[in-house]
Image (spheres, rainbow, N blue to C red):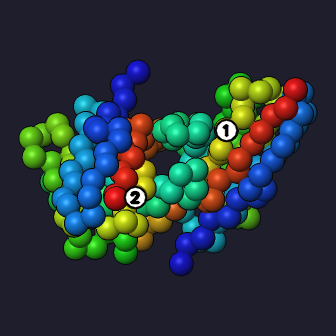
Amino acid sequence: EPEVTQTPSHQVTQMGQEVILRCVPISNHLYFYWYRQILGQKVEFLVSFYNNEISEKSEIFDDQFSVERPDGSNFTLKIRSTKLEDSIMYFCASSEEPGYEANTIYFGEGSWLTVV
Amino acid sequence: ELKVEQNPLFLSMQEGKNYTIYCNYSTTSDRLYWYRQDPGKSLESLFVLLSNGAVKQEGRLMASLDTKARLSTLHITAAVHDLSATYFCAVEGWDGGSQGNLIFGKGTKLSVKP
């Protein structure tokens, strides 16, 4: 079964450093997303990306964050200057174009970021 | 503001018993999703329910959607230990723009005991 893959699975970084989280969405999918989750708790939407641009973003997704699809396969989330409160699990997700009845949104295994 | 409320948040069941998890949402939405999450793992898609009130079943799990009541249920039949996980419902925060902005409930942590 096709899957969304994320790297790294866990990253430890110093406060103030830049971090890039990488994702490879499912190959025929056109919509890409980033979500975050405090361990075992509520899942929060960050941003959606379609046709090489951000289509929607939440209040959480401020100037500290950016997304990019640099090479047609990877989808990245950059956090420019990490803060302690950025220590959280980040999930990448992807889906087919809207209109398909079974338009499931598939999630990756997550990247756990620890800011020290 | 779109709200998604699940209850109960914690559920301890005995094997073989039936139970229902409820998901209320506060506004109209095109789709409702149910996900399962094991500790430290990804969100596994269980069901996508469209606004036509579809009922879907997979093994011991059955999900339904009542769009008038803005209520979805996830019914567990004859629970087994393997169903122990956290179950999330989510609704698209549709604002006429892009899809996929899912608003999640807080999750229901299910523990099935022998």
Whether label 2 touches label 1, CB < 8 Å = no
- Helix, strand or loop at mark 2: loop
For the point 32% across and 67% down, the residue is A83
Q: Quadrant of residue A42?
A: bottom right
Q: Nearer the viewer, residue B12 or B18?
A: B12
Q: In the image, residue B32 lies at what x, y percent?
A: 57, 52
Q: Chain of mark 2?
A: A
Is residue A113 left or right of B89 when viewed as pictured?
left
Q: Nearer the viewer, residue B27 or A88?
A: A88
Q: Nearer the viewer, residue B40 or B45?
A: B40
The C terminus of chain A, quarter of image: bottom left
Question: What is the number of the mark on residue B14?
Answer: none
Residue under label 2:
A87
Q: Quadrant of residue B75?
A: top right
Q: Chain of mark 1?
A: B
Residue under label 1:
B85
Q: In the image, residue A43 lies at what x, y percent?
A: 51, 56
Q: Amino acid at mark 1?
A: Ala
Q: Residues within 10 Å of mark 2 (few under 14, many from 20)?
A: some
Residue at far top of view: A1
Depicted B69 relative to depicted B34: above or below: below
Q: Residue A41: tell me if it is visible.
A: yes
Q: Residue B99: tell me if it is visible.
A: no
Residue at far left of view: A71
Q: Amino acid at mark 2?
A: Ser
- Helix, strand or loop at mark 1: strand
